[in-house]
Amino acid sequence: MTLAGTKATSTALTHQPDEQVGSGDSTAPKASSLWQTLKPFGWQGLLLIAVLIVLYAPVLKALVHQWYTDADYSHGFLVPLLSLYLIWQRRGKLREIARRPSPWGMLVVLFSVGLLFLGSLGAELFLTRISILGTICGLIAYFCGGALLRAMAFPLAFLLFAIPIPTLIYNEIVFPLQFVASKFATSTLETLNLFPIMREGNVLILPNMSLEVVEACSGIRSLMSLLALAAGYGYLAERSTAVRWLLFLAMVPLAIISNGTRVMITALMANYIGPRAAEGFMHEFSGWVIFVVATALFLGLHSLTIVVRKRLGWLPKGESTPAQGKVTQ
């Protein structure tokens, strides 16, 4: 708020030779490593990965820099970590999947590299960044097969939350969010009838000052972070795909309402405390409070779905929570 004035091979789990221990034999499974996966492809496979790392180094550097400087995407640092955690959590099931390398994966890699060059020529950052995800998917299919790629679909798709949306789309989202937040705040304050208030566009006119709902107060920052939270939480804590989608989509109105409430609280503080309450620490602190409130409402909604499904008999017998620490796809 501001004051206005490729070859088909199969890599499977390797086992140590049977050794007689005491009175019987035992076989200890040994986890397949990245090197065991890439070894059948020799130096060509390693060279391919090295070349791709060099190609994408500038793109990754610029992406990390935006995470650091753009508060709207500061959650980008956490997204890859959570994605790796989701993969690690399913490591047992992923080891059981037979590796059947597919040459089609190389076509995906080539297409993604093509997007990289197109994006570089046209200075379109979104294309260069989305090509990273395409290249990762292509390499997994090329070296390990489509079955493993499908099993890792959600953790890989989750990486999309770390990629800033195109500027054109961003601008189309921000202004409506500014308008909705200002309208929500004005309507609520008019209902409370605490003091006279008017609205012109995204500007709130108070008795002694005017408040403008600028881009930073549009709620886009909290919306992107909360959507990432909703997707990750739904995957970890819920088995039903329908409920996962319900929770994810419900986060949109929850974030909008929470941000509108933030604008309303800012207007209240500015009117009763003074203009300084609309800026600085109090303004930033109110943003964190609303983020926590939106998260609490989201968790409450999930708890409500559990209670309703339990009463309707839609939950499996003996299951009090949908996930119980297990993740299914």
Image (cartoon, grey):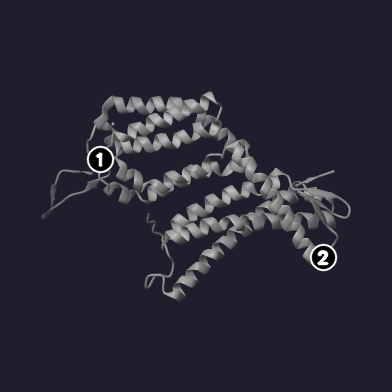
Q: Amino acid at mark 2?
A: Asn
**Label 2: how many Cα within 10 Å (few below 14, some 14–19, many 20+):** few
| Residue at far bottom of view | 311
Q: Is residue 290 left or right of residue 1?
A: left
Give whichever of discs 1 and 2 has the lower sequence position: 1
Q: Are marks 1 and 2 in contact (CB under 8 Å)?
A: no
Q: Position of residue 263 (x, y in %)?
A: 73, 54
- Which label was assigned to residue 193? 2
Determine whether 74 is above or below 261 in the image.
Answer: above
Q: Which residue is mark 1?
A: 100
Q: Position of residue 131 (x, y in %)?
A: 46, 33
Q: Position of residue 282 (x, y in %)?
A: 75, 51
How many labels sit on residues? 2
Determine whether 106 is above or below 233 in the image.
Answer: above
Residue 8, picture quadrant: top left
- Which label was assigned to residue 23? none
